[in-house]
Amino acid sequence: MTAAAAPPPSRARKRFGQNALATPANFITLSRIAIAIPALTLIRDRGSEWLTVGLWFAITASDSLDGWLARRDGATRSGAFLDPVADKLIVLGGFAVLADRGVFPWWAVMLVVLRELGISVYRSVAGRRGVVLPAQKLGKYKAFAQYCSVGFVLLPFTSDLVGFQHLVFVIAVVLTVVSGLQIVRRGYIDWQRLDT
């Protein structure tokens, strides 16, 4: 009698089903949300300090970690919901706090808010029609630029370089808008295919 063949490595690593809640990726995501609250408070009250930089780096760098864990162990519905919530809370919270401090203009921050919320609704509507709109490369660049635009305000080495901070922020806003238009276009094309 021959031994049963081992499952492919990619399947063997998927430790959690889609309905799982208690996963390492979800733990990291919830930790990011928990750390974001004191981090945003420190940004509002104390601004550029190494402590705020450290917390900001922790919650932004761990975004890649929870994504890696989800891919390794298996994506879950709870993770698909929690991860975007964490990302938006962190980025929009950072932008709002810095706008309140007069660092970023409110109109630009509101543009980012409208894009993020609008695309979330758009993805939800598209999903109900059977159209999946995963993150594109431009969206990943957008997220990185958003994190950097807050980080460079907090980093003591660049805290006085206002022109540089505004340049990075403008790049983040432009990427935010363009990546949003890319998603809308992709959704429209996929809807057209479904309707034909």
Image: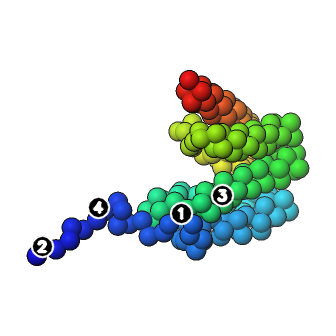
Above or below residue 103? Residue 37 is: below
The residue at the point 80 percent across, 39 percent down is: 114
Q: Earlier in the sequence, mark 3 or mark 2?
A: 2
Looking at the rendered image, the quarter that the C terminus falls into is: top right
Q: Earlier in the sequence, mark 2 or mark 1?
A: 2
- Packing grade of label 2 (10 A; few <14, some 14-19, many >=20) is few
Query: Mark 4 and 1 residues: CB-CB less than 8 Å, in contact?
Result: no
Task: Give amino acid for label 3.
Answer: Phe
Query: Mark 2 and 1 residues: CB-CB less than 8 Å, in contact?
Result: no
Cα separation, mark 3 vs mark 2, equals 43 Å
Q: Which residue is mark 1?
A: 18
Q: Which mark is residue 188?
A: none
* Helix, strand or loop status at disc 1: loop
**Which mark is in front, 2 or 1?**
2
Q: Earlier in the sequence, mark 3 or mark 1?
A: 1
Whether residue 57 can be seen here = no
Task: Give amino acid for label 2.
Answer: Thr
Q: Which residue is mark 2?
A: 2
Q: Which residue is mark 3?
A: 81
- Packing grade of label 1 (10 A; few <14, some 14-19, many >=20) is few
Query: Mark 4 and 3 residues: CB-CB less than 8 Å, in contact?
Result: no
Residue 136: quadrant of the picture = top right
Q: Which residue is mark 4?
A: 8
In the image, 174 versus 114, the foreground residue is 114
